[in-house]
Amino acid sequence: MEKQMDRCNSCITLPDDAKEEFIVFVEGDELYASMLSAISKAQHSIQLETYIFAYDQIGKTFVSALAERARNGVEVRVLVDAVGSSRWSSQQLIKALRQSGVELHWFHTWSWQHPLRYNCRDHRKLLVVDSKVAFLGGFNIHKENSKNLSGDARWRDTHIRFTGIKANEASQLFDLFWSGHLREVVSQPATGSQLLHNQTLACRHRLRCEYASVFEQAKRTVYITTPYFVPDSYTINELIKTSNRGVDVKLLVPRKSDVRIALWASRSLYAPMLASGIEIYEFLPRILHAKTVVIDKTWSFIGTANLDYRSLFINYELTLVSANRHLSETLEEQFLYDLKEAEKVSSDQWFKRDLLARLAGLVASILKRWL
């Protein structure tokens, strides 16, 4: 049976494909070990793209691994967002990478000639080794994701490892983005999964189109995990319509956030969703940074995009959408596990919140397009 999803100007056909293999990571130490292992085995090329590359214990380990491969003749290219890493990286990181032969580019540094582009960030977190193995998801390269270094305060995130055709396509997408070719399209054969990107000028709002389509087609469940829930009114209305059709819509967001104003903006949107029957849960133990959507235990989205204005309209993102049943079941199982550590938002309590909370939400909602 095939699953069909509308694209902005065409469509993506997702056949069931049990042959695809994925590994899902929810702990940083396990993910970093797997990434470093793949890097150490690289023979030809390493392509690393990240929003945050900190020069801490985790970052230094990656610098050493990348530098070692570069010194041994492997082509190593690293693309780092200039804003995301501005307070995390250092000249030592830059020097260590470049002296070893690593090609390091900073995405959209400040320019008086092009000030508006500074608002558009590269939010992708992608590693591709030899065009054969790829890692994609919400994890940045910093110690905040490490249980060994940050303990119970570590961020809760999700990443995925995949191989084969999709890894090769991810490599091609990296190449085009690296070279600034934003009009070229990578051909993606029909498999059980597709890489959704918004790097071409043809459809910068592609992810929003896909979400609207799957919400409309959902029959039983829509389970969303996002650290920043600040979408446009159209996306919210699609979720409300989905809930009104009797679909079980659950939203998991953080109670604590590294961006406080985004949290206030998110809460300003609760009222109409609660009124429609959407269940909202706030994750309690630590910062939640995972970005996943599971539809009917059949379709799943996992990648770098938040459900907010920046990811839907401004930043560059990359998301794997899959009809792989096992992957969807794995992500749904993790979602339900996370709910055990979350508190359900009560409609009665929410509508009784104090004046200060209401004012904070109002101010944040006005600024939501720029958060």
Image (spheres, rainbow, N blue to C red):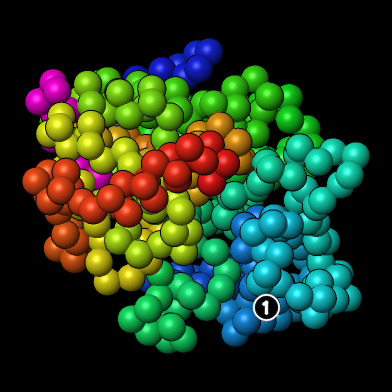
x and y, in percent, of residue 96 in the image: 81, 78
Question: Is 41 rendered above or below residue 334?
Answer: below
Q: Residue at x 56, y 32 (%)?
A: 313
Which quadrant holds residue 19?
top left
Is residue 250 in view from this perspective? yes
In the rendered view, would you say 184 is above or below 129?
Answer: above
What residue is rendered at 54% in x and 26% in y?
205
Q: Quadrant of residue 41?
A: bottom right
Instruction: Give the magenta range.
Output: 243-251
Give the image location of residue 229, x and y in percent. Answer: 38, 44
The answer to whether residue 298 is magenta is no
Work out which quarter of the rendered image holds the N terminus and state it.
Answer: top left
Label total for image: 1
Q: Quadrant of residue 307?
A: top left
Disc 1: which residue: 55
Q: Does residue 124 appear left or right of residue 1 in this picture?
A: right
Q: Position of residue 217 (x, y in %)?
A: 25, 21
Q: Residue furthest top?
A: 9
Q: Residue furthest front?
A: 355
Q: Does 78 sit above or below residue 33?
A: above
Residue 114 or 90: which is nearer the viewer?
Answer: 114
Residue found 76% across the figure and 62% down from its top: 76
Amino acid on which disc 1 is placed: Tyr
Q: Of 154 and 25, which appears nearest the observer?
A: 154
Q: Residues within 10 Å of mark 1 (few under 14, many from 20)?
A: many
Residue 324 showing in the rendered view: no
- Picture coordinates of residue 291, whole percent (x, y): 39, 50
Horizontal placement of 106 versus 305: left or right? Answer: right
**SS assignment at label 1:** loop
Please name the residue shown 23% across and 31% down the image: 272
